[in-house]
Image: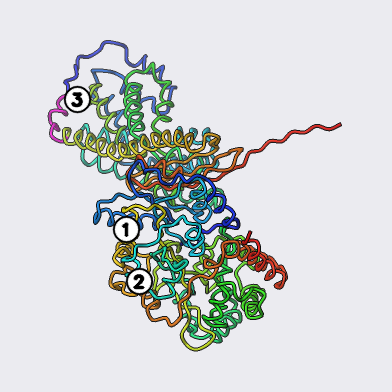
Amino acid sequence: MSRRARVTAVSIVVALVAVACTPDTTEEANPASRLRVFSVYRGADAEAFRSVLDEFTRETGIEASYVGTAAFAARIQDRVRNGDPPDVALFPQPALLAEMARAGFLVPIDDGVAASIADGYADWAVDLATVEGKLFGAWYKLSVNSLVWYPPQLFAARGYEVPTTWNELRALTDQMVRDGYTPWCLGMEAFDATGWVGTDWIEDLVLRLHGPDIYDQWTSGEIPFTDERIREAFAAFSELALQPGQVAGGRRAILSVPVLDAIDPMFEEPPGCLLTRQGSFQQGELPEGLTFGPNGDVDVFVLPPMQGTTAPLLASGEIAAVFTDSEEARALLAFLASPRSGEPWAAAGGYNSPHLSFDATAYGTELDRRLGELVQSAEVVRFDGADLMPPAVGTGTFWDGMVDLVAGAPLDRVLAEIQSGYSEGTP
Amino acid sequence: MEEVDAAGSDAPLEDDAGDRRVLSPSGSLLRRLVQPGHWEEDERKAVLDELFFEGPEWRPFLFRFGSLIILSTTIAALGLISNSAAVVIGAMLVAPLMTPILAVAAALVHGQLDRLGVSIMVLVGGTIAAVATGWGISRLAPGTITAAELTSELLARTSPSILDLGVAIAAGLAGGYVLTHPRAGSSLPGVAIAVALVPPLATVGISLELGATSEARGALLLFVTNLVAIVLSAMIVMLASGFVPADTRIMVRGRLRVGLAIALLATIGVSVPLAWRTADLVGDQRFTRDVISSIREWDPAGRIIELQADIGESGASVDLVVASSRSPVPAWRLAELLAQSRDVPVEVAVEYRLEQRDEATAD
């Protein structure tokens, strides 16, 4: 769900430099003496997260109030700029967290808690929130992005099998076209954040075509978008999604259909599509009354690998960090860094833990349980690349470039424009 | 119940009543009912004949009643769908449901269980026919309205409050007053409009067809409210006017008490959900006032264009369209402001409209 919250943040560095020059008013005492927590969770997610904060209050006696916004990246920058940061924020974008840490707005995590985080998470997950050798964040919630949602009953009736390799997937979509179906549903419309669904596709394709090492070099900026290997991923996306007959409603629908509504035609009669690639956060936004599971109305499989037999997983999620250097804020961070802090939400459903030692019996829904196993057993897990790139690129030119590509712009020009975000981002 | 003086009146009944005959189709019912105190046996029978149709009268009555139910509901449903208040009022005046409802009241005050059973069956049958007709009309007129966008005429019948119970009781008593005081006869259409029965039933049918179940529940509650309030009021009027002979009243004392108790309990019964709904309504109104003052604090330059604010036990929601000439203040600040003084989470959605003005002149 975090993905809906992202908003273009092109000028972050400029903004932060400007803030650094203004008098700091963040030391003011919080009149309500409650911790102010800021993130992206709204609706049912906000309710679940409040139950987590209630648990924290029960344990420590420290009160916390929560505010969730649909435009986290922009709003957190406003708040810092206005000298009104929250005490604790949960960032969907590790790159934004790193920027704020570098600019001196975040409080490093205590050594004791940092040590337990180092033990409790995969190394690459610890690295996400490490800036200049210091740990600034604890990954609280994980979403699995590389999922394909499909209707199992129709698959059974048609004799379709869940594909386990990329070639099987291509053969399946060809078969669907021959049977008179449109294979994919795809919607990218997300207000200021339109385009991120496309970036997720590209990330999954880079990871599948070239493996984690090239992926890491690409997300860290060492390999440019104009590189032939990255171009290959964009071309594969164009071939899969932008050819006539592949996506319900065609290119026009891709840009106008809201991200989490894209799946809806799958459940119409006759179905408008049979596949949609979307993260686990789709769970909370399925049409009402559907049953989930291999025999239900809707189920998921992992987007198949192109090499080998184990699919790499793309993950996203929120990382908690502290703005106010207080005992209470540090206590909340230590709580959010502990595996048990995820349990109230896991019981309610729609939560996966990034902790290696999370108690799988705490998951309240079948999907969360399966995703938990998937993450534990995956050989390769990588964080959403756009959220790792500098905001000028990751939530800027990369999003815009995907929109241009779908709208019909030539690929080479799109790639050059996305890459140009790197020079924009450095003043 | 207070004993009603049964002393006879020497006034020339027949002449007086003869002038009223033209007032309404139920003129003879009126004529008999309006005589306070003393009722001759044949007068009483004539009134009851207007309410109960037995033997050879049964089939023609049923045909008449069924036709009028279907016609009046058709008029009401079309008026509701096309949002025409005048058409809906027309339907109220055609509606025949008052007869079985008064029959239920009359059977109750006379302690006549067999007639009560038949009247209730007619009433239930008429209710079902009206709902089915509303459903059918909505089915035949597809696409004109949706569950999300009901007309204001429909919506006006989906959220009854305790005020509607007050209207129904007062209008029921007024109806009784009209029955016992012929000079007020011209007020009868007002009674029919004040406690309309068919439009709520048409609304139930239309809402069900559109899948708007909570609206259907609201309209059904409005119908039941009007129904029980009329039965109770009519019973009181019939007893107070001396319509029920003293010896009958004494003979069926037990049944009469049970009947009154049931009507009273039913009225209290509907008042409970009505009170809840009223409390919700009042809560929403108070919340809306709070929201408006918070919006002024949140963005003093903002002008409210649309505001929908609801609050319940599990949470509050605010949908706001705001126009401003300067850059928008983030929605989370409003949400935080509203949540500070409340125990429930507040969801805020704001649509900003940038208002700018430019002027120029050239030669």
Label of residue B245 in the image: 3
Mark with earlier residue (2, 1): 1
Q: Are marks 3 and 1 in contact (CB under 8 Å)?
A: no
Q: Is residue B282 magenta?
A: no
The residue lying at 54 percent from left, 79 percent from top is A207
Nearer to the camera, A172 or B35:
A172
Q: Residue furthest top?
A: B10
The residue lying at 39 percent from left, 45 percent from top is B316
Mark 3–mark 1 distance (CA, rounded to whole Å): 71 Å
Element carrying mark 1: helix
Q: Is residue B107 left or right of residue A106?
A: left
| Chain of residue at mark 3 | B
Label of residue A355 in the image: 2
**Residue B12's x, y, as percent?**
32, 12
Q: Amino acid at mark 1?
A: Val
Labels 3 and 1 share a subunit? no
Residue mark closest to the camera, 2 vs 1: 2
Task: Establish if A78 lies above or below B287.
Answer: below
| Chain of residue at mark 2 | A
| Chain of residue at mark 1 | A
Residue at the disc numbered 1: A52
Could you say which quadrant of the image residue B41 lies in?
top left
Q: Amino acid at mark 2?
A: His
**Residue B107's x, y, as percent?**
24, 35
Nearer to the camera, A217 or B270:
A217
Task: Establish if B4 lies above or below B196.
Answer: above
Which residue range is magenta in the image?
B246-255
Dominant secondary structure (helix, strand or loop) of the stretch shown in magenta = helix
Q: Where, quadrant-wise, is the C terminus of chain A in this rendering? A: bottom right
Nearer to the camera, B30 or B305:
B305
Element carrying mark 3: loop
